[in-house]
Image (cartoon, grey):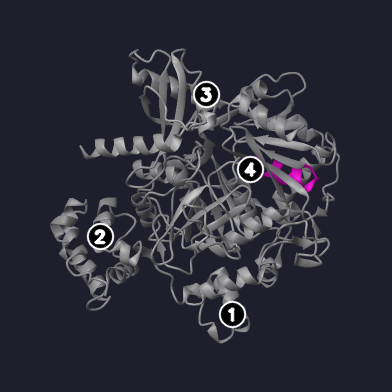
Amino acid sequence: MAASARGSVWEIQPRDVEAAGLAAADAAAFVAALRSAAAAAGSGATRDAVWAAVAAAGVLRPEHPHALHQLVYYSTYAGWDRDARGPPPYWFPSPIDCKQTNLGRLMEANGPKLLGSSYKDPISSLSHFYRFSVENQEVYWSMVLKQLAVNFKQEPRSILSTSDRSKKGGTWLQGAVLNIAECCLLPCPSLKRTDDSTAIIWRDEGLDDYPVNRMSLKELRGQVITVAHALDAMFEKGDRIAIDMPMTCNAVIIYLAIILGGFVVVSIADSFAPQEIGSRMGVSKAKAIFTQDFIVRGGKKVPLYSRVVQGTSSKAVVIPAIGDSIGITLRNGDMSWKDFLSRAAGRSSSYSPVYQSVDALTNILFSSGTTGEPKAIPWTQLSPIRCASDTWAHLDVRPCEIGCWPTNLGWVMGPIIIYSCFLNGAALALYHGSPLGRDFCKFVQDAGVTVLGSVPSLVKSWKAGNCAEGLDWTKIRVLGTTGEASDIDDNLWLTSRASYKPIVECCGGTELASSYIQGSLLRPQVFGAFSGASMSTGFVILDEQGTPYQLRRHGDIIQRTVGGYYIVQGRADDTMNLGGIKTSSVEIERVCNRADECLLETAAVSIKPSGGGPEHLAILAVLKDRSAQYDVNLLKRKFQTAIQKNLNPLFKVSYVKVVPEFPRTASNKLLRRVLRDQLAQELSNRSKL
């Protein structure tokens, strides 16, 4: 029998509430309301039942100090037995509201027919319906496809064909012909999307007190058509064309136009150093690149075009970051955005999309592997369908909603949020500036965002700056997070700002075009954990010997908890996750080895904080002169400078240590795992002292 909540939340006194930051005049009333809500859970109620009652009663409000939310949450769950009961839930699905979710509506309409008498309701029957989706892929996907704005020029002959044994896993949507960008741009009555519907909402940094800007579907389609006509005047169908710029309205327009016209997008993150830009241009064989003169962040202009010029000789089309005119001199052969658009002058206001098979290449993205070389990931027209269907089922993106996920087209979340909004009938919200501070958080309020995505390091920045203070985030219905391990207290802050809405944790990969494991609005949610596999996705859990005991082999070590939740423990190989960006030890070491002449070699490892949250980058160094003394702080600054200049300015060096030698295998392979364990133990001991 689980322990009663008596002796936890009941012990909170007005003086405790005052110490947590609530005004003395309000403390007694708050405690009375808290106890009344807790009592409504019933005599002898368990701690999770008490928390559910307190959260439902609205006793805790977004404007309350975070310390007060901490006091109530941690007091309620004091003494909770995680080993026996699993991680404590903070959000619970409503038996009524669950039937209005996308997946709930599908289950209510089809559950009795597909599951028979075993179907009860969306919450209690979720596990049965999940198994059905895995074992009956054709039935499941035929239903989901009808929920999305996917218009086939030629309908598929089958959902999944296994007739060609050379194709492992079968052939999806065999014979289907379409243009996935066109699907994003056409009205869709079933999703309540018309030409007058808002397609994009945006705001430029520095104009934060002005109303947000809105672009209708008709206006978006017109601008995409203009760019597509200009592309036709310069390139051959099938050419690869790169985009290296912030995720602005123009970036989205260019992205859709490239695909509408039968070209291929090459996605490059705007934070990359010149050599990283060049390597990706070379691997993809890109003919040209769209970029900006500068990146505007926090009121500062960061050069971007100059990095592109250093990295590639390919033709560049340059968009001004501010105003209508570019602020730099272009090299010979490059072109301004204004001159590029003039190529479409006199062209028709209509456009004939290039229709291709569903497995046609549309986008080349990149994921860093352990070799240090950029790994090209091809996306076909199937990829957008997969990512939009997953956000439909798990993030519950609905027609007429507003989705916002600050990211970049160089990372997988860029294309995912585009397709997740447009194929589900939602508007896309874009902030042209830094997402780290209050200005972005105010944009979330002013744009009326209903689905907000993030990475944990971003949430940490918002929380540290108290960036949502005084803002109204109550329109947010669902929160999402991906990219790295979440910090429990940061997520407590995040959900409390939105009146305790669910945070859907997502974990996947660029190759998948989605997540293989994530949260669900039909299950109670716990902080920093996934509630199950993605719909229709089966996977096997391997033990430490690689033996299946529960099909995707992934680079994360995952713990399955009591209650059926999953918690990522960190990377199993030498690929690390820094600020939501996956990179390899080899990449970092290659840069750091050249940071100082005194260095013999370096080893880069990531350390997971004992309290959870994002990984920290640690660099260990071996000096050429083993007996020499070296200023570790100076070395840390040199490593930081080298990484920012040559790899990625977003990576932060947290710890540097000089050691006499590195542990190695008999074949002289560096044992980073041993270094990681040794350093984690050392830092743990230091924190205890």
User: Mark 1 or mark 4: which comes first in sequence?
Assistant: 1
Please tell me which of labels 3 and 1 falls first in the chain. Answer: 1
- Between the C-alphas of marks 3 and 4, the distance is 34 Å
Q: Is residue 197 left or right of residue 314?
A: left
**Badge 1 density bin: few <14, some 14–19, many ≥20, Cα 10 Å:** many
**Which residue carries the number 2 mark?**
72
First in residue order: circle 2 vs circle 1: 2
Q: CB of mark 4 within 8 Å of CB of mark 2?
A: no
Q: Position of residue 211 (x, y in %)?
A: 52, 47
Q: Is label 3 in a helix, a strand or a loop?
A: helix
Could you say whether the residue bearing mark 2 is in a helix, strand or loop? helix
Q: Nearer the viewer, residue 615 or 340?
A: 615
Residue, disc 1: 111
The kind of residue on which mark 3 rests is Val
Q: If you read the primary sequence from the N terminus, does the residue marked by circle 4 or circle 2 appear first?
A: 2
The local crowd at label 3, few if under 14, some if 14 to 19, many if 20 or more residues have their Cα within 10 Å, is some
Which disc, if any, is residue 249?
Answer: 4
Cα–Cα span, label 3 and label 1: 55 Å
In screen coordinates, is 459 left or right of 163? left
Q: Which residue appears at 34% of the width and 21% of the height?
A: 633
Q: Is residue 376 visible?
A: yes
Residue 605: % across, % down: 44, 34
Label 3 with label 4: CB-CB less than 8 Å: no
Q: Which residue is mark 3?
A: 591
Residue 195 location, quadrant: bottom right
Determine the residue positioned at 15% across, 59% down.
14
Q: Does dot 4 land on a helix, a strand or a loop?
A: helix
3 or 4: mark nearer the eye: 3
Where residue 487 appears, x then y in whole percent? 37, 49
- Say whether marks 3 and 2 touch (CB < 8 Å): no
